[in-house]
Amino acid sequence: MGEGYGDMAACIFFAEHGFQREVFEPWVFGDVGGLRRVDGTKVYPADWQSDEHEDGEIWSAALWNVFRAIGGDSAVLAERLGARDAVIKTVTLSHHLLVASSSMPEGAEAVMRANAALPQYRGRHLVALLDSFHARGLLAVDPAADLQFSASAAGPAVWMRQVDDNGTTHQTPLPGQDGFCYARVRNAGTVSARAFVVNFLIQPTVSSGFSYPVDFLPPLSAACGFALAPGASTIVKARVPADDLPSTSADGLLLASVYAPTDQATPGSHVGEHDNLAAQPLGSALDDRPRAGASPTSGGSAPQ
């Protein structure tokens, strides 16, 4: 991971300086081969060689592909620089979550956790991170995992709180104050869900016509979860800054989508048509809360 980090950081940072973007130290052999590349196709653990230089290309390629996915291939300079800063900062700060013996999959989890925690990103790159880590075998999600939003006797499937207190009932956000989005996710599948992302977005009006993904993405904030066992459920949360809340919070609608590379809502689907989608009117009373799998205006409950 240390070798891969160094290759990634050098290639991403100097991508704007005329070097071959995908090649680390291209001058070493006097040709275009370079010392190592960050655009390889190695997969963990099948291509593991127990050599730090060979195996480092798994890590560097996973991170390089994230850079490309979040703006590194853009024609707009500011977007390329933003992608550069996001990947290097996120990965660098993720090291605080690791120990000397951490594995590459544990490193992938740490990168996702760091991106979710950084206030300027708030997890908005989590889908790209998970897609890349899944493709490289680091956080491979089995298709037999079945993620869905799940209400319970304690509260709705998705909700907001005025403070970060882990409460399980909905509160209307307060004007000029950060809000906190929560979601309860259940794995209805037969195998563990290695990793998943919950994306949160707030629409200024309440409607049952919002469709996935155009009205759900990109998120305002997102959260991640890992190793969700079959039949188990967990609660994830994310902060939404006050400036991103509607001026009249009671008029807004919280939309949530749970995502894994092998499990996502069908394009064009709405809340009530897919278990990976849920909604909560920001100003609704507790008795009016929508359940996962129910239209935000129907008052129905999801199958349990």
Image (spheres, rainbow, N blue to C red):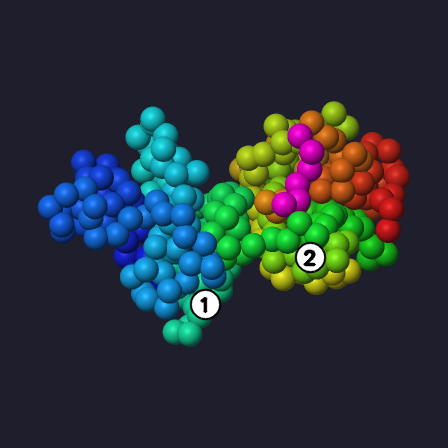
Pointer 2 local density, CA inside 10 Å: few below 14, some 14–19, many at least 20: some
Q: Position of residue 9 (x, y in %)?
A: 29, 51
**Mark 2, residue position:** 235
- State the residue at coordinates (49%, 64%): 106
Question: Where does the magenta region start and end?
Answer: 262-267
**Which residue is identified by label 1?**
103
Above or below for 70 versus 103: above
Q: CA distance from mark 2 to mark 1?
A: 25 Å
Measuring 72% from the left and 39% from the top, which residue is drawn there?
Answer: 277
State yes or no: residue 264 in magenta: yes
Quick check: marks 2 and 1 in contact, CB under 8 Å? no
* Residue 187 can be seen, yes or no: yes
As drawn, the label of residue 53 is none
If you read the primary sequence from the N terminus, does the residue marked by circle 2 or circle 1 appear first? 1
Task: Judge whether residue 99 is colored magenta.
Answer: no
Local crowd size for mark 1, using a 10 Å CA cut-off: few (<14), some (14–19), many (≥20):
few
Asked whether residue 283 is in view, the answer is no
Name the element at disc 2: strand
- Give the camera-side residue of 303 and 230: 230
Q: Residue furthest left?
A: 30
Q: Main secondary structure of the magenta part?
A: loop
Number of marks in the rendered image: 2
Q: Which residue is at 80% across, 35% downward?
A: 272
Image position, residue 220 (x, y; %): 56, 39
Relative to residue 82, is residue 112 drawn left or right?
right
